[in-house]
Image: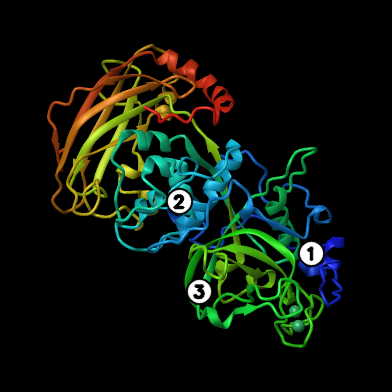
Amino acid sequence: MINFSKRFFAAGSLFFVIFTGPVAAEKAERARVEYPGKFSRPPSQGKNYNTWKDATGPDVGEEKIDPRRLPSRVDNSTRKQYPPIYKQRWGTCGQFAAIGSIFTYEMNVLNGTAADTDATRFPAHFSWNMMNRAENRGSEAYHGWEVAKRIGIPTAKTYGGVRLDKIGVWPNGYQIWREAMEYRVSGYRYSPANTVDQLNEARGWLFDRNQQKVRKEAIGGIFALDGRMGELKKVTKTIQDGEYLAGDDVWIRWGPSGNGHGITCVGYDDQVGYDVNGDGKITNDLDLNGDGKVTLADWERGAYIVVNSWGQNWSKDGKIFLLYSAMIDSTWKRGNYLGRAEVTRYVPLRTLRLKLACSDRTDLRMSIGIASDNDATAPEHEFSPEAFNGWPLFREGNAGHVPIAGPEDKTPIEIGVDLTTLFKKLGAVKDEGKLFISLSGAGTGEFEGVLYECGIRNYDRNGEFLHESKVRVKGKDFGKMPIHLYTTVDNLSRSRQEELGARKSFQKRRGANNAAPN
Ligand SMILES: [Ca+2]
Ligand SMILES: [Ca+2]
């Protein structure tokens, strides 16, 4: 149960509130991981897909939850690691929450930097344009986190801003794709917030991730939320006169109708309350919903702090309170869950640089393989990068049947693909190997592709560019008939050694070098 600090009672509240302990049935509902529906992870990966597998931090509920040490208020949006409150355009809310806000915040916490310029902020549109079919349509938070896992996210500075002024544009410039590789998501999770135990785990995450650090500042995490936004006026209330933070707005429920909207939970305030049932007092110990027991669902006091990407002037400061009890809503399942992400830095050692054009980027097929024998006629290991194979991970959520540069833009773009993992599979028994690249068009429609340039780039363990081996492109055109390229790759043993030292070295360098990567 929540224990309120002395500050609460000194806060000038006219009401003295007695808190009861959670009932036994509720106590069993511990903080836990849950995949509540298809909005929480890509259905294409099946029921066993563990979205936290590559994360290094403790999973939901693994840490000891000790609510006694939690302050009555946490607002991480006031930290220097949190970007400005944005005003979204188009159906980009999911990516403004997942990447523009949460990824940016977490990356700045990791790097020890401030989200004060575009060099340390991350765009909402890069991941959005991977899944929006080049149209104005909505996305889930996981779309952004999966893009960040599989490609990475470039900084807003390199990308050209937090948002672009056209839908469906893919970046042209190897350095943008190369920079993206450095900034990744390692894992993400959803957890319900329907009981006091679960609420306390969430409050602990917001305060210091439930990880008490001696003599070190606690920097908490933040959450993705999915609110229902129809008829908002019915549920948006102004905190009554004489109450703590009187005049501020609070959502007492999700909207009674309408669609989901991606928003960001940046903190909480245990003192904020609203007299929902109108009995003249704000209580957490009365059975308001008439189910015969007092649970979190009955609480009138205690609220999350939510940032909405509707601009800094919306609801006075771009933020609003959301009662803890509002997230227990059987009519809006999405609204009962909190999403979190863990981020990481990554150093590619080998990459592929391609300059190409094609008439349909979702029908593009690209496979890259490797063999340890120079004379091999087929690869031993092969992979098909998601972005250049129509995003099979997202199924319907692809990048649109438009040219690779974007709608009505037939110009070629220069892209980058990380090959480090592929090279790793070879194990480097020999110093030389053979790389296979194949490009073709799928689908039933016409497909035209042209490959202009191809190079293999090498980096040292610090991510510094070493050199590029150009791959000769003979027949440039491809369509339903693929083109195949082969090249010898050398220094494989070097890349093995580099790889072993890469992560460690990069951690030290982190944040020290902001030069654009080659
Ligand atoms: Ca009341
Ligand atoms: Ca009740």
Helix, strand or loop at disc 1? Answer: helix
Task: State the CA–CA distance, disc 1 to disc 3.
Answer: 31 Å
| Mark sitting on residue 229 | 3
Is residue 38 visible in the rendered structure shown here? Answer: yes
- Residue type beneath disc 1: Lys
- As displayed, is residue 213 above or below residue 8? above
* Percent position of residue 84, x then y: 52, 54
- Tell me the residue that label 2 is attached to: 144
Residue at left offset 76%, top offset 73%: 295
Mark 2 is surrounded, within 10 Å at the Cα level, by few (under 14), some (14 to 19) or many (20 or more) other residues, namely many
| Mark sitting on residue 27 | 1
> Can you say which quadrant of the picture contains the C terminus?
top left
Residue at left offset 60%, top offset 46%: 80
Viewer-proximal residue, 119 or 103?
119
- Residue type beneath disc 3: Met
Residue 265 lies left or right of residue 150; in this view the side is: right
The quarter of the picture where residue 294 lies is bottom right
Q: How many labels does the image show?
A: 3
- As displayed, is residue 194 above or below residue 252? above
Helix, strand or loop at disc 3? Answer: strand
Give the image quadrant in which the ligand numbered 1 is located: bottom right
Residue 287 lies left or right of residue 362; in this view the side is: right
Task: State the CA–CA distance, disc 1 to disc 2.
Answer: 34 Å
Helix, strand or loop at disc 2? Answer: helix
Instruction: Of the two numbered discs 2 and 3 on the same chain, state the one appearing first in sequence.
Output: 2
Q: Decide: marks 2, 3 in contact (CB < 8 A)? A: no
- Residue type beneath disc 2: Gly
